[in-house]
Amino acid sequence: RQEQFRRLRDTPASTKDGVDVSLMINAGLMMDLPHLQESGASGIGLFRTELQFMIASSFPRLGEQEGFYRDVMEGAGDKPVTFRSLDVGGDKVLPYIRTHPEENPALGWRAIRLGLDRPALLKTQIRALLKAAAGRTLRLMFPMVTEVSEFERAAQIVRNEEAHLRRHDHPTADKVELGAMLEVPSLLWQLDELLAKVDFLSVGSNDLFQFLMASDRGSTRLAGRFDALSPAFLRPLRKVAHRARDMGKPVSVCGEIAGRPLEAMALLALGYRSLSMAPSSIGPIKAMILELRLEPLAERLNAMLDEDVSASELRTELRAWANIE
Ligand code: PEP
Ligand code: MG
């Protein structure tokens, strides 16, 4: 099968009925870069910048960050990279940032919350990204956005840094595209306001599922207890895909479900056309897409979601569909 997936590398990911899907990889370190070419993915849909910070023993300086981001973009060649600003705090502890123990670290002082409270950290990272992206487009998204105003404040920092670099004749990105990760359920009720402000959205399905189901993603006791194909999860995901399409904003999914064949089939049926996953999932997901007739599946799955349906019925349906094809 490995050999079969390798042969698919240069085949575009299009369904049998001609729907094009963009498949991208999640990455975080230089050693992930070769996977981009090997897998034939069309870009890096999620670059987790915190990994560089987690392996460092002190806060990486501006120049170090800049050099690293430049290496990443050069390594990706002409394929786009979507960086995510620092997603630390909670249980991803950096020994050189002072934090206090929290009872619920996943709900705590982390990600963009920490970034907005410690703007010097966020500014340094943004400046490093802007400088590294000189001559290119910088795509940057913010994690754990809970209220639209947090995105606006972060975007304002980007604009200020850009203006600063230009004023001092420093090189900076030719163009900047800013996005939000949709991983906190509160955003589901601020979709129109959010979509009006962002250039793109990326659904972090790991956290969105964890928060929607109030179910710790790391708990072995709870693993598998709630199904990602639950209508309670798929219905809001469908709403996000539809609103983004209506407002003309690109949306992708970058959590683990994007790399699982049945779940990815469901995402396509809900309207997603861009998925970002672990590099090892690209082959299997592409193989699934090449065998898929999406239109009738979408019709069936959406009809089921409009009725009283359970996750296991949806799973059985998708499994049957995967076998017929
Ligand atoms: C997510 O939450 O789905 C996500 C992609 O981000 P992370 O797994 O890094 O929290
Ligand atoms: Mg997340």
Image (spheres, rainbow, N blue to C red):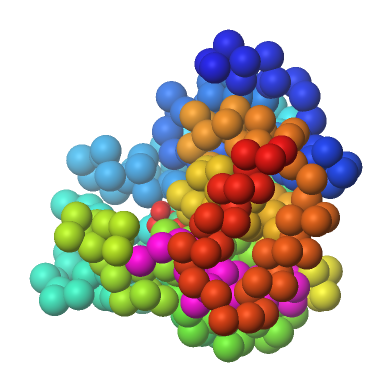
- In the rendered image of this protein, does residue 61 appear above or below residue 145? above
Question: Is residue 234 a member of the stretch shown in magenta?
Answer: yes
Q: Which residues are magenta?
A: 226-244
The C terminus lies in quadrant: top right
> Which residue shows up at 44% across the image and 39% down it?
28
**Of residues 33 and 176, which is closer to you in this image?**
33
Judge from the rendering whether residue 308 lies leftward or rightward of residue 114; answer left or right.
Answer: right
Occupied quadrant, residue 221: bottom left
Ligand 1 is found in the corner quadrant, namely bottom left
- Left or right of 165? Residue 294 is right
Which residue sits at x=49%, y=84%? 186
Residue at the farthest right position: 18
- Is residue 222 placed above or below 304 in the rendered structure? above
252 horizontally vs 225: left or right: right
Say above or below: 243 vs 8. below
What percent of the width, then of the height, locates residue 46? Answer: 54, 47
Task: Give the image location of residue 86, x and y in percent.
Answer: 41, 56
Write the residue at 63% across / 42% down.
322
Quick one: quadrant of the N terminus?
top right
Residue sitting at x 59%, y 56%: 317
Tell me if residue 77 can be seen: yes
Could you tell me what secondary structure mostly forms the magenta stretch? Answer: helix
- Whether residue 103 is in magenta: the answer is no
Residue 78 x %, y %: 74, 31
Quarter of the image for residue 247 reads: bottom right
- Viewer-proximal residue among 98 and 106: 106
Q: Position of residue 85 (x, y in %)?
A: 48, 57
Q: Is residue 120 visible?
A: no
